[in-house]
Image: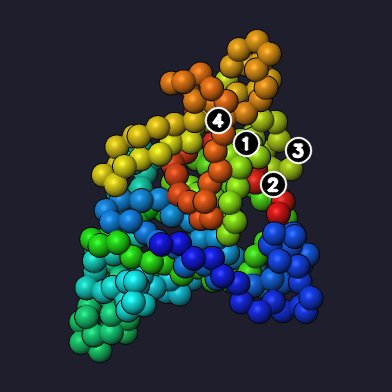
Amino acid sequence: MKKLMFAAAVAAGLAAFGDGIESANTVGYQAKSVRRLLSQQVCTFDAIGGGGMDIQKLIPVDENGDYIGDGDITIQFTSDRGALQGAYAYYGEDEYDDDCPAGWYNEDTDERVTFSFDPGQGFQVNAGTACIFTYAGEVVPAQAFVPCRRLLSPQGNIRPVSVDIQTIIPVDAVDDGEYIGDGDITIQFTSDRGALEGAFAYYGDDEYDDDCPAGWYNEDTDERVTYSFEPGQGFLVNAGAACYLKFPAL
């Protein structure tokens, strides 16, 4: 299940996504399915007025729109080698303890979390059952640079629309940065238990082989990839050096 819907825009007469976005004040929401067990996720909207999304505005629900509580859904933060470093779990009203409001809790500190995701920040979800996250906020149509640390980091398609992988370029700096080639940056796909299922690596012109154009390659098949990410689709990045994923403007 994957729905993509947009609320009324602040400015009248905005174009639909298929025709291009003409205002930074376009707002909307996206209901995105989250599989059972492990997956990578990313917010596809920024907070209205700028900044990342408040975690307390992200509520896991089932197909009927009812919240899933009792700590069954956790948002996890991992190290650059994939080790769990911290997690927040979702509870309904009075579920974590008497008189505790609904929300995400840090079970190690027994505190309701105060946290906002940075724009484009990816994260891991461990779900006891499949659920739905609704991302809401402001569409940012400008070219974007998403930071990726060295080694592993959860990332995803930050756009609420499909994006051709070949339009995403790993670079070493914002704005005028150079691409990072020679297969040093890979986009990885994992199973619901975290096992590697496939990967694409980035190469510059003639780096993969003579007369091969720049782009993402499947090193198992020796083919330049034809692939588009779904809106908000998560993935892992394995980087030999810290980098940025440059997303084109919408």
Name the residue tied to disc 3: 176
Q: For this view, does 53 lie left or right of residue 206?
A: left
The disc label shown at residue 146, or none: none
Q: Name the secondary structure under disc 2.
A: loop
Q: Earlier along the polypeptide chain: callout 2 or callout 3?
A: 3
**Contact? badges 2 and 3 (CB < 8 Å):** no
Q: Position of residue 43 (x, y in %)?
A: 51, 60
Q: Nearer the viewer, residue 77 or 219?
A: 219
Determine the image quadrant of residue 228. Answer: top right
Measure the alpha-carbon separation of dots 3 and 4: 25 Å
Badge 1, how many Cα within 10 Å: few under 14, some, many 20+?
Answer: some
Asked if one can make out residue 85 in the rendered structure from this viewpoint, the answer is no
Give the left or right position of residue 213, taking residue 221 as reference. right
Q: Which residue is mark 1?
A: 166
Marks 2 and 3, how far apart at CA:
14 Å
Closer mark to the observer between disc 3 and disc 4 = 4
First-in-chain label (4 vs 1): 1
